[in-house]
Image (cartoon, grey):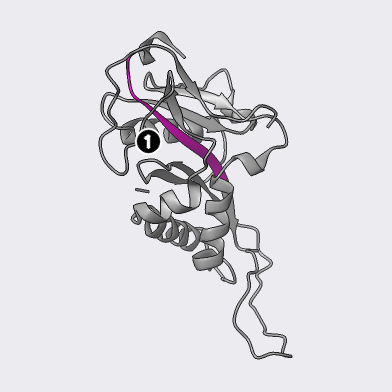
Amino acid sequence: MPEAARNKPLEIWFQDEARVGQQGTLTRIWAKRGTRPRAPRDTRYQWAYIFGAVCPERGAAAGLVMPFADTAAMNAHLSEIARTVAPGAHAVLVLDGAGWHGAHALVVPDNISLVPLPPYSPELNPVENVWQYLRANWLAISVFDDYDAIVDACCHAWNRFADNPERVSSIASRDWAKVSEYGRWYYSVRGPVYRCEQTAHYTTGLAEGGMR
């Protein structure tokens, strides 16, 4: 951890991106037994990207909808996350190994430290489950007329999700993703993050090997 994080409460955040486009995705729907329900499917090629991050302990979320997934978009998202971190806290941002997550031009705010996941381990990133939830409820089986329609749908879906802190925590919480300080635990559910009086070494519980 950087020196700037010393004696500060820590927040565990997870970050990822999802592409949403005109070709769309399918999902399950209710239908009469024995029937094969129809679903619309577009063949055009416009899309946008949702950059999403969540803090399960606080039920907080920070997201942007961007036209590209690149370093510039990631810098904008890091700035958005930095503004959402609780005042006086330091965020440990867990993310995958996408090229723009480690680019030389990446500007990481002072209140964020990046923690890359091991290769080929999407199951360790709860935001993958967030994408499943958004597609199943708002983004699947849809036809978008143009790019603006895609952006509007993405913003609507993300904001519906982010405005429900209980839902954020329910989907993204992981028992192994906790913050301890010599055995002490931090708990801050949708409120300020507080630090125990004892100060020293911070650790995260990541398993080994393993718009607004």
Q: Which quadrant holds residue 166?
A: bottom left
Q: Residue drawn 47% across and 14% down?
A: 1
Which element carries disc 1, helix, strand or loop? helix
Residue 97 horizontal side relative to residue 77, left or right: right
Looking at this rendering, what residue extends furthest in the front direction?
183
Q: Nearer the viewer, residue 196 or 30?
A: 196
Q: Residue drawn 38% across and 31% down?
A: 79
The residue singled out by tag 1 in the image is 80
> Does residue 14 belong to the magenta stretch?
yes
Q: Which quadrant holds residue 116?
A: top right
Image coords of residue 163 (percent x, y)? 33, 55
Q: Is residue 199 above or below residue 9?
A: above
Q: Nearer the viewer, residue 112 or 167?
A: 167
- By secondary structure, the bulk of the magenta-drawn segment is best described as strand
Q: Is residue 191 visible?
A: yes
Q: Give the residue type at disc 1.
A: Glu
> Does residue 201 belong to the magenta stretch?
no
Q: Is residue 23 above or below residue 73?
A: below
Q: Residue drawn 56% across and 65% down?
A: 136
Q: Tell me the crowding category of disc 1: few under 14, some 14 to 19, or many 20 or more residues within 10 angstroms, Cα based.
A: many
Q: Residue drawn 35% across and 52% down?
A: 165
Q: Is residue 47 visible?
A: no
Image coords of residue 72 (percent x, y)? 50, 31
Magenta span covers which residues? 7-17
Q: Is residue 35 above or below residue 74?
A: below
Q: Nearer the viewer, residue 173 or 18?
A: 173
